[in-house]
Image (cartoon, grey):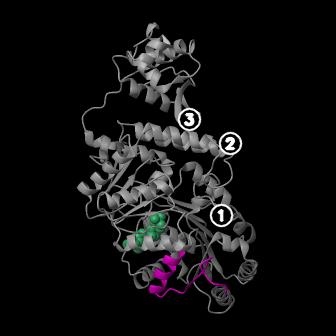
Amino acid sequence: MGRLYNTSTPYYAEAVSALKSVFGLTSFRQNQLEAINATLDGKDVFVLMPTGGGKSLCYQLPAVCKTGRTQGVTFVISPLVALIADQVASLREKHVNVDCMSSLRTVDDSRDVMRRLRSQQKPDICYITPEKLRESNAMQDILAQLYEDKQIARFVIDEAHVIQSWGRDFRDAYAELHMLRERYRDVPIMALTATANKTAIQDIRTRLGLRDPLCLMQSFNRPNLYYAVQPKPSTKKKVVQAIAGFIKSQHATHTGIVYGFSKLECEELAEQLRNDYGLSAKHYHAGMDSQERSTTQEEWQSGSCKIIVATIAFGMGIDKPDVRFVIHSTLPKSMDGYYQETGRAGRDGDPADCILYYAHRDAVSRHQLINSDRNDKGPARTPEEKKRQLEDLSAVAQYCRNEADCRRSLILAHFNERFDSHLCPKGCDNCSRGGTVFRQLYTLEAQQAIRLFGEMAASMDRIALGHFKDVYAGRNRAKVRESGHDQLSLFGVGKGVDGDRIISAMLGADIFAIAREASASGWTNDYLKVIKAQSSFCW
Ligand SMILES: Nc1ncnc2c1ncn2[C@@H]1O[C@H](COP(=O)(O)OP(=O)(O)OP(=O)(O)O)[C@@H](O)[C@H]1O
């Protein structure tokens, strides 16, 4: 559907008029008009737009139009009550007739909304959480009646990626949304998300039963974001020092987000940034009560607190335009997650920094955690979940270890988008370094490391990582002498090369693996294992 064709639809005049009079905007952004025209024409639509791209307008605007093929209420299924509250407040300021059903509403409020849905003064938009939709029988009755009266204009599934069972934001009530198509066959559906690769898109389409949808996708490139990966210092104290140093030197007066892994880590990090470095930082995680969380978020949103140190519980629906930096103190769970989290920076289009601190030890602990049966989200992981989480981890670790390729190209490749790295001059650490990247084959060194491992394994059951590195590098340590490994024919075979990097890259390529074991005294030891041999090896 071309742009010209879009302006000649029967819906265009009303859409432009509403854009100006209701939303106070002057022009459509990429794909907005296409989405609006298609849904007003009764078609299913799938919208994939980067965070901050303007997805909300794609369904809010048609909801106030009267010329569409389908009439009545636009139901918006949205996963977060806080997000719903923000959207409702902002629409009410624009005098849009909007209601919502969520756990934040009192029983009386909900009754009121349902009464209005049954009356002649129906809202144009009704936001609802998937849980409320599933659990309320009264709501089901209302929907059935509205459907019979042809008074449902469309269903909108916001943050549609939540429907994927393996997704990190998965909610089981989302999985049941397939019933919308089954029960209300003629009602058009619009699904929107900012995070989906090809498989995920197909999955969302199938799960929602979309019928020949108009798929609107656009580049995921965020040209104003600078991406960099920094080596993570070896102690907690030095990590805080590095983060504080970066903020103080580059963003002393700016707003930002620091993502940490655990609730405790976030609390400690925020406290140290505050007490030791005088920065205006507060923590945020799912373990806080909802009042405390919304107060912290409000303080950050209003600018009275500059830095939020958070787990990934902080994010979905954040619409603060002037976030100038997003720091990851440890590696994110997946490339999808990384894109989403960094996407909260620079929504106003001005430059912003995305810095990730990477240490191989973090990847090892995460690997260990996924393989263990502990799961922070409740029931133990299924084998399929484990596999997918390990794949996600491996993709992120590979991204972090890559010191040669354009980071923007790597990120966009994850969304199956080709990006010419020449268009990223100094837009990431790897492109900023300039010069020519030499790729060198290290097949021989890797093969020798595997052979050395074999020689050592003949006289030792479990080979500690540190010990292996010493023997590979030919270090004359007491432990090496005691084990007799200084007498092996391959002792010191990695002397002339950067052994740490070769071994770490072999770990990343799943040639080696680490088994972490706790000793009786509570210390943990990392032991090396060989997983597979590789025919060629380079970085
Ligand atoms: N056509 C437009 N012209 C100017 N500003 C717009 C337009 N459409 C949307 N915006 C603005 O862009 C910002 C982001 O829009 P919106 O919140 O809909 O993004 P989003 O795609 O839903 O992002 P997220 O995935 O993070 O929720 C808002 O401040 C909105 O007012």
- The residue at the point 52 percent across, 31 percent down is 525
Residue indicated by mark 2: 383
**Dividing the picture into quarters, in which one does residue 290 lie?**
bottom right
Q: Which residues are magenta?
A: 84-107
- The number of numbered discs placed on residues in the rendered structure image is 3
Left or right relative to 360: residue 107 = right
Q: Is mark 3 within 8 Å of ligand 1?
A: no
Q: Is residue 263 visible?
A: yes
| Among the two numbered marks 1 and 2 on one chain, the one whose residue lies closer to the N terminus | 1
Real-space Cα separation, disc 1 to disc 3, in angstroms: 46 Å
Residue indicated by mark 3: 521
- Front-most of residues 420 and 405: 405
Where does the image place residue 257, in percent across and percent down from the top left?
Answer: 39, 60
Sort mark 1 into few (<14), some (14-19) or many (20+) by Cα contacts within 10 Å.
many
Dots 1 and 2: beta carbons under 8 Å?
no
Vertical order, 255 against 521 (above or below): below
- Residue 174, numbered circle: 1
Ligand 1 resides in the quarter of the picture at bottom left
- The residue at the point 46 percent across, 57 percent down is 340
Left or right relative to 233: residue 123 = right
| Among the two numbered marks 2 and 3 on one chain, the one whose residue lies closer to the N terminus | 2
| Among the two numbered marks 1 and 3 on one chain, the one whose residue lies closer to the N terminus | 1
Sort mark 2 into few (<14), some (14-19) or many (20+) by Cα contacts within 10 Å.
few
